[in-house]
């Protein structure tokens, strides 16, 4: 891809709407960008999309998993006044929800704009003003007069609500603003790696997986891994960027390169695979850093526990402000992740797989 094509692709991946359980449009977009290179495309019964590029017979199967769902909300109740009460999908902090623009997608696909509101602080006690307002006390203001008008728009209980955040290239030309970088960015990496392998004589069979329902419990990763039966797997995700005022001095920062995850709250990286990936990064001159996140998890948390165990680790990209309406990532970090995974896949074969397994008992 040219830079212009890649930025257009990333814009599409960011702006498509699909909270956990409502990922169909994101899956369609994923399919559009892999259909010309994949040998076949399959789905599991939860909706994860699995694009296969065949290798040689008897060689390992490698799964690249980026989840295509995003955090958002569902319509919980329509008040008689026309205001919408909503329920969070995925982890939200009340501080980042108020006064934000959202879009409700009706069952017919109609997009309805609204803004998140709540009782104003005027007249509140100091104690009330200093608390984080709970989401249950917020509502979406559609600018209608009553429930009948809201229902006339086509809104129903259970409709998807997503942040409304247009993609932008920021002022340094490298920082990219968007919603849903968690984790459309990882899904985009999987797509690009598959496209990079077009015409390449690689041995391993590669499966680019757009998994679903990660934000509500890594559910799609479990069913997708059961479907694919990988020998080696990578969860591709974002991680904390510690380059903010007052943040701890940890190495994952925008511009620091692709992050090799040592562990998180759901998985400890397979050490043999970790060392193999780091060796390739060094050999190919790929900029990388290390990540160790003690809370939270990624698709690796379910993938590595399938069957008698899958050799698994997480590859991450530093990101600011995820699980909010606005996230920031660095374009070069994304490129380094694509380069690294492309080279890793090219280097994986049955001899390498045997040596990775042996690191656990020899």
Image (spheres, rainbow, N blue to C red):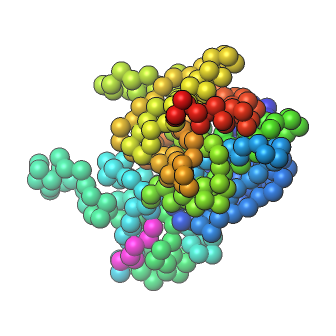
Quadrant of the snapshot with the N terminus:
top right
In the figure, 46 relative to 116: above or below?
below
The one of 178 and 40 positioned closer to us in this rendering: 40
Residue 1 is one of the magenta-drawn residues: no
In the figure, 357 relative to 76: above or below?
above
Q: Is residue 350 left or right of residue 318?
A: right
Q: Is residue 358 left or right of residue 145?
A: right
Q: Residue at x 78, y 45 (%)?
A: 58
Quadrant of the snapshot with the C terminus:
top right
The one of 153 and 175 positioned closer to us in this rendering: 175
Residue 138 percent across, percent down from the top left: 32, 62
Residue 343 percent across, percent down from the top left: 72, 29
- Classified by dominant secondary structure, the portion drawn in magenta counts as strand
Residue 75 is one of the magenta-drawn residues: yes
In the figure, 174 relative to 312: above or below?
above
In the figure, 271 relative to 212: above or below?
above
Q: Is residue 101 left or right of residue 352?
A: left
Query: Residue 109, can we see it?
Result: yes
Q: Residue at x 45, y 38 (%)?
A: 268
Q: Is residue 65 left or right of residue 347?
A: left
Q: Residue at x 56, y 72 (%)?
A: 106
Magenta stretch, residue numbers: 74-79
């Amino acid at each position: 891809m040219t830079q212009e094509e890649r930025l257009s692709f990333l814009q599409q991946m960011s702006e498509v709407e699909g909270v956990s359980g409502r990922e169909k449009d994101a899956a369609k977009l994923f399919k559009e960008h892999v259909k010309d290179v994949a040998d076949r495309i399959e789905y599991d019964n939860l909706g994860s999309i699995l694009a296969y590029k065949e290798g040689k017979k008897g060689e390992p199967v490698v799964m690249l998993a980026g989840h295509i769902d995003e955090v958002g909300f569902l319509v919980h109740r329509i008040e008689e006044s026309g205001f919408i009460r909503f329920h969070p999908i995925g982890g939200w902090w009340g501080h980042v929800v108020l006064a934000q623009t959202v879009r409700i997608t009706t069952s017919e696909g109609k997009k309805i704009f609204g803004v998140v509101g709540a009782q104003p602080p005027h007249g509140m006690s100091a104690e009330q003003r200093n608390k984080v307002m709970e989401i249950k006390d917020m509502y979406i203001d559609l600018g209608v007069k009553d429930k009948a008008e809201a229902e006339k728009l086509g809104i129903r209980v259970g409709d998807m609500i997503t942040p409304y955040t247009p993609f932008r290239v920021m002022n340094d030309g490298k920082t990219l603003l968007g919603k849903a970088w968690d984790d459309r960015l990882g899904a985009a990496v999987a797509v690009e790696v598959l496209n990079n392998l077009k015409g390449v004589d690689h041995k391993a069979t590669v499966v680019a997986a757009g998994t679903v329902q990660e934000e509500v419990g890594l559910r799609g990763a479990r069913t997708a891994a059961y479907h694919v039966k990988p020998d080696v797997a990578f969860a591709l995700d974002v991680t904390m960027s510690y380059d903010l005022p007052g943040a701890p001095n940890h190495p994952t920062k925008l511009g620091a390169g692709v992050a090799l995850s040592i562990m998180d709250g759901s998985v400890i990286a397979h050490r043999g695979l970790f060392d193999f990936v780091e060796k390739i990064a060094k050999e190919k001159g790929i900029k990388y850093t290390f990540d160790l996140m003690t809370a939270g998890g990624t698709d690796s948390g379910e993938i590595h526990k399938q069957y008698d165990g899958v050799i698994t680790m997480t590859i991450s990209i530093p990101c600011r402000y995820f699980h909010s309406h606005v996230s920031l990532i660095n374009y070069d970090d994304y490129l380094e992740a694509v380069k690294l995974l492309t080279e890793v896949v090219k280097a994986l074969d049955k001899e390498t797989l045997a040596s990775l397994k042996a690191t656990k008992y020899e």
